[in-house]
Image: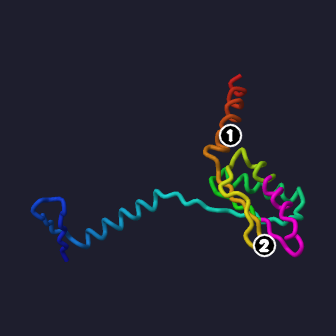
């Protein structure tokens, strides 16, 4: 089946007869190429409680560091139960400490906020955060190898 394409820019309307099947195929091919070039950003999540101790929080922060260095966003969530809701400042302090610990590889994309019984902050990888650090560590190692 043929399709008639009309050019609106020409003074007298100009038509071109094209193969509709080929037209659909080429359009689908362009869409596939566009999808390949897109980068999909994944959001990882760390869940904590206000009473989570320093050691467990340290493990979670290291996971977040690894994810941020890979280029993923990290959502840090603190869930409240029972009377913990009366002390949101504890969770706010925890979130600030976590954001500060990860400040070398991330930036705060969404400031700490309350949503129902949870408080959360979203961290995004900083531009060239951990990669520069790795390159700086490799350069002295290469100089030592030469000496």
On the picture, is 101 further left or further right than 68? right
- Residue at the disc numbered 2: 117
On the picture, is 79 further left or further right than 32? right
Let me know if residue 141 is in the magenta part: no
- x 73%, y 47%: residue: 103
Specify start and end residues of the magenta stretch as a single range: 78-96
Residues 147 and 114: in front is: 114
**How dense is the environment of label 2, judged by Cα within 10 Å: few (below 14), some, or many (20 and up)?**
few
The single residue placed furthest to the bottom in the displayed view is 1
Q: Quadrant of the C terminus?
A: top right
Mark 1 → mark 2, Cα distance in angstroms: 39 Å
The single residue placed furthest to the left in the displayed view is 12
- Residue at the disc numbered 1: 134
- x 18%, y 59%: residue: 9
The secondary structure that most of the magenta stretch takes on is helix
Q: Quadrant of the N terminus?
A: bottom left
- First in sequence, mark 1 or 2: give its number: 2
């Amino acid at each position: 089946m043929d399709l008639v394409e009309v050019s609106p820019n020409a003074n007298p309307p100009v038509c071109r007869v094209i193969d509709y099947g080929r037209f659909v195929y080429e359009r689908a091919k362009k869409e596939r190429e566009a999808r390949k070039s897109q980068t999909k950003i994944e959001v990882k999540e760390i869940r904590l409680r206000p009473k989570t101790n320093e050691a467990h929080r340290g493990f979670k922060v290291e996971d977040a560091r690894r994810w941020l260095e890979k280029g993923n966003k990290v959502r840090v969530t603190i869930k409240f139960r029972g009377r913990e809701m009366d002390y949101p400042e504890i969770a706010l302090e925890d979130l600030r400490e976590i954001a500060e610990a990860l400040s070398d590889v991330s930036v705060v994309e969404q400031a700490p906020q309350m949503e129902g019984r949870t408080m959360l902050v979203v961290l995004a990888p900083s531009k060239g955060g951990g990669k520069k650090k790795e390159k700086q560590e490799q350069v002295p190692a290469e100089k030592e190898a030469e000496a």
